[in-house]
Amino acid sequence: MLNKSFFERVYDVVRQIPCGNVTSYGAIARYLGSGMSARMVGWAMNQSHHVKDPVPAHRVVNRNGKLTGKNHFGGPSTMQQLLEAEGIHIENDTILDFEKHFWDPMRELK
């Protein structure tokens, strides 16, 4: 993993988020040892639509469960639709029961 770019390392983590779960930009940054790089994780998610292997970027939200990246999915409701198809309920662009759906890479990827 040392020879991979930061974005590639982010994509590796995001590809492991199980269906029906979400994580945050900051949780990914902390897992990668770059706790102050949550914004860079966001930039990686913005670019993820252009990589060869699919990245379920819709499963990455802000620390409060807000769909802050929703405008990068081709339509303002696409991110919500993808999450709802996985059984996640959303109201006012915020995941309900966020803690229930939160997947922490620090705990899950040992």
Image (spheres, rainbow, N blue to C red):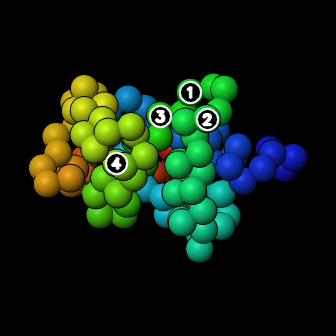
Q: Which of marks 1 and 2 is in front?
A: 2
Residue at image point 87% right, 46% down: 3
Q: Do the residues labelled 3 and 4 touch (CB within 8 Å)?
A: no
Q: Which mark is residue 54?
A: 1
Q: Residue 107: where, in percent of width, then height?
A: 50, 51
Label 3, secondary structure: give it.
loop
Q: Are marks 1 and 3 in contact (CB under 8 Å)?
A: yes
Give the answer, above or below, for where 31 lies relative to 82: below
Residue at image point 21% right, 54% down: 94
Q: Residue 77: where, in percent of width, then height?
A: 25, 40
Q: Residue 34: where, in percent of width, then height?
A: 65, 67
Q: How crowded is mark 3: few (under 14 residues within 10 Å), some or many (20 or more)?
A: some
Q: Residue 84: where, in percent of width, then height?
A: 22, 32
Badge 4 amino acid: Lys
> Label 4 belongs to which residue?
70
Tell me the distance, in whole angstroms, between the alpha carbons under discs 4 and 1.
17 Å
In the image: residue 96, left or right of residue 1:
left
Q: Residue 90 carries which label?
A: none
Tell me the distance, in whole angstroms, between the alpha carbons under discs 3 and 4.
13 Å
